[in-house]
């Protein structure tokens, strides 16, 4: 592999870190603006839950699929598409005239975030063939993720108080445009030299299964774990994910070769990352359930912004 020039390498690492920090910030900053959104769009707790979940569900459900498509058609190309979707939908979120428009724009924003998240690490890997360079780049990438979660509430609260709730979305527009320009000018294309064909049955069953699973996990506390909708979602998720395993076992070119999961070197390296992501998601779920139990959060009024997750969430580390 030819070593990329320093300017291209630095630009790629910077845009990957900035894009990932942006999409992670949009998970955390939204919680500080719920009170203002409720008043501005005249909505209740149900609408606010969908503002949060409409972003998280497509982000979690499509990230693996986005990575598989990027390997075949081009990582830079999909990264740029994700940036465009994320930036444009952020503008729509900031201009939303009603809760329905905001929820729809958040769903598109989550889809764009999925494309960026799936390709950011791959872009870093292709410009850091040397182990030492890659270690430094991954450290910067991890620091960007950690900083976005740590600073998200502060940034969101400041923007909301000074400029209003729309600012937490509109701030993504100039940053996204700058990242888009740098990516277009300085980031090289990359793809798998021996890409597999697009595993359509695998993509459909995986996206459907993850969508229903994440939906059930996010809505279970609010709707009740024994409610018909949650039970149906969990059963549907189980059926589709089992179908995904069957499809992958029978496919000549699976999107996720299941034999890799039996290899300790592969599975072991991903366990800490998976555990960290689960803990991050758990913090935000606890934050919402804490708000639901608080009497100050049962109405759309000032005071909601004081609801926070327990302090141990901030100290949970992989």
Image: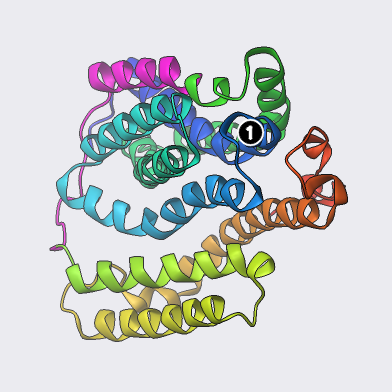
Residue to which mark 1 is pinned: 29
**Residue depicted at x 51% and y 19%:** 171
Q: Is residue 39 above or below residue 65?
A: above
Magenta span has 251? Answer: no
**Residue depicted at x 46% and y 44%:** 103
Magenta span has 180? Answer: yes
The quarter of the image holding the C terminus is: bottom right
Residue 243, by quadrant, is bottom left
- Whether residue 316 is visible: no
The quarter of the image holding the N terminus is: top left
Q: Is residue 212 above or below residue 248?
A: above
Horizontal side of residue 226 vs 19, given as left or right: right
Horizontal side of residue 315 vs 192, given as left or right: right
Horizontal side of residue 89 vs 234, given as left or right: left
Instruction: List x then y, in percent, for residue 114.
Output: 39, 46
The magenta segment: 171-197
Residue 219 or residue 24, whichever sits in front: 219
Instruction: List x then y, in percent, for residue 108.
Output: 36, 42
Residue 4, by quadrant, is top left
**Residue depicted at x 82% and y 58%:** 293
């Amino acid at each position: 592999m030819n070593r990329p020039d320093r300017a291209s390498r630095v630009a790629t690492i910077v845009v990957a870190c900035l894009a990932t920090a942006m999409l992670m910030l949009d998970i955390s900053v939204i919680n500080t603006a719920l009170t203002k959104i409720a008043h501005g769009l005249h909505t209740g707790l149900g609408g606010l839950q969908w503002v949060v979940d409409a972003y998280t569900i497509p982000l979690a459900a499509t990230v693996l699929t986005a990575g598989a498509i990027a390997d075949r058609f081009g990582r830079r190309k999909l990264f740029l598409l994700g940036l465009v979707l994320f930036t444009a939908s952020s503008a729509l979120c900031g201009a939303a005239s009603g809760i329905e428009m905001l929820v729809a724009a958040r769903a598109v924003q989550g889809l764009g975030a999925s494309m960026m998240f799936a390709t950011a690490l791959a872009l870093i890997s292709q410009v850091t063939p040397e182990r030492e360079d890659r270690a430094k780049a991954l450290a910067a990438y991890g620091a960007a993720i950690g900083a976005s979660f740590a600073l998200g509430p502060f940034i969101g609260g400041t923007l909301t108080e000074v400029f209003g709730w729309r600012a937490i979305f509109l701030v993504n527009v100039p940053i996204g445009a700058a990242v888009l320009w740098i990516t277009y000018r300085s980031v090289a294309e990359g793809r798998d030299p021996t890409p597999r064909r697009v595993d359509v049955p695998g993509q459909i069953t995986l996206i459907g299964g993850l969508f229903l699973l994440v939906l059930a996990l996010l809505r279970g506390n609010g709707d009740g774990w024994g409610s018909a909708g949650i039970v149906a979602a969990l059963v549907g998720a189980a059926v589709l994910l089992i179908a995904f395993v069957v499809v992958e076992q029978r496919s000549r070119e699976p999107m996720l070769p299941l034999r890799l999961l039996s290899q300790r070197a592969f599975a072991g390296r991903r366990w800490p990352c998976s555990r960290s992501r689960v803990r991050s998601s758990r913090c935000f779920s606890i934050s919402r359930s804490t708000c639901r139990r608080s009497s100050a959060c049962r109405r759309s009024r000032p005071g909601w912004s004081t609801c926070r997750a327990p302090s141990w969430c901030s100290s949970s580390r992989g």
